[in-house]
Amino acid sequence: MRRRAPAIVERPSPNFGPRPEGAAVDLLILHYTGMKSAEAALERLTDRAAEVSAHYLIDEDGTVFRLVDEQHRAWHAGVSSWHGRPDVNGFSIGIELVNPGHEWGYRAFAPAQLAACAALARAIVARHAIRPWRVLGHSDVAPARKADPGELFDWALLARRGVGLWPPEARAEPAEPLVAGAHGAAVVAMQAALAEFGYACPTSGAFDAATGHVVTAFQRHFRPRQVDGRFDAECRRRLAWLLARVD
């Protein structure tokens, strides 16, 4: 059964600006608040001095707050990029989900919150014709800085509701994983594939710290049950599946 987009509570934030001239919204970015309570997050996201915001915030009980109108540029992604394009704020919609995050007692996202997120996200991607592979986490567009919404976010549920992509489970052939410090053609191929999907991944042939951040971000989103920073055969298969669905 189709679920309607949830009712929205208006909680306007002064923290927004114009989008770049001619910019079309083509990314949806999901975050966690990383604060101890919903009210603390709302206060910060609507505090002019904080200079941060998002278009929406979803509380754990499923309540949706609209902070910034979608036509405006909210300040949610910070220093970020996707497919080599910086200033993700300029062409994205940002949704914050109330969760204390890794710093304050990270926990699973509540069912009501996930249901509201799926319904809201489905409406957003329909309005802006956002492609499934362009529904991302904050950590995808800022892998060196951010870990949200993290490995406990249920991306598979969102995909079942028609939002984003979720690779199927598949047995991978045993192969030695690529790990930090590795060099060579296999590393170049991994880096190139991650960059092709959209990550800001170097293609140096060296599995350096920057590459490690990207691999970890990829796992948090697309292989969350094992986030170890090692690019193994399962990661390779999942990435290949995703790339086959990008047009």
Image (spheres, rainbow, N blue to C red):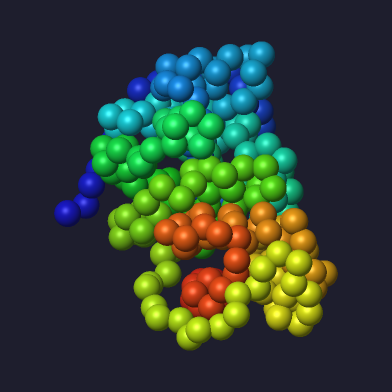
* Residue at the (58%, 55%) spot, across then down: 217
The quadrant holding residue 17 is top right
Q: Given the current orientation, which residue lies at the most extreme right position?
A: 204
* Residue at the (76%, 82%) spot, across then down: 185
Q: Given the current orientation, which residue lies at the most extreme left position?
A: 1
* Residue at the (66%, 47%) spot, across then down: 142
* Residue 227, image x, y percentages: 52, 57
Is 108 on the left-hand or right-hand side of 191? left
Viewer-proximal residue among 65 and 190: 190
On screen, residue 102 above or below 63:
below
Viewer-proximal residue among 192 and 81: 192
Q: Quadrant of the C terminus?
A: bottom right
Is 116 on the left-hand or right-hand side of 88? left
Residue 116 makes an appearance in the image: no
* Residue 44, image x, y percentages: 55, 18
The quadrant holding residue 52 is top right
Residue 217 makes an appearance in the image: yes
* Residue 9, image x, y percentages: 35, 23
On screen, residue 187 above or below 66:
below
Q: Given the current orientation, which residue lies at the most extreme bottom position?
A: 173
* Residue at the (17%, 54%) spot, across then down: 1
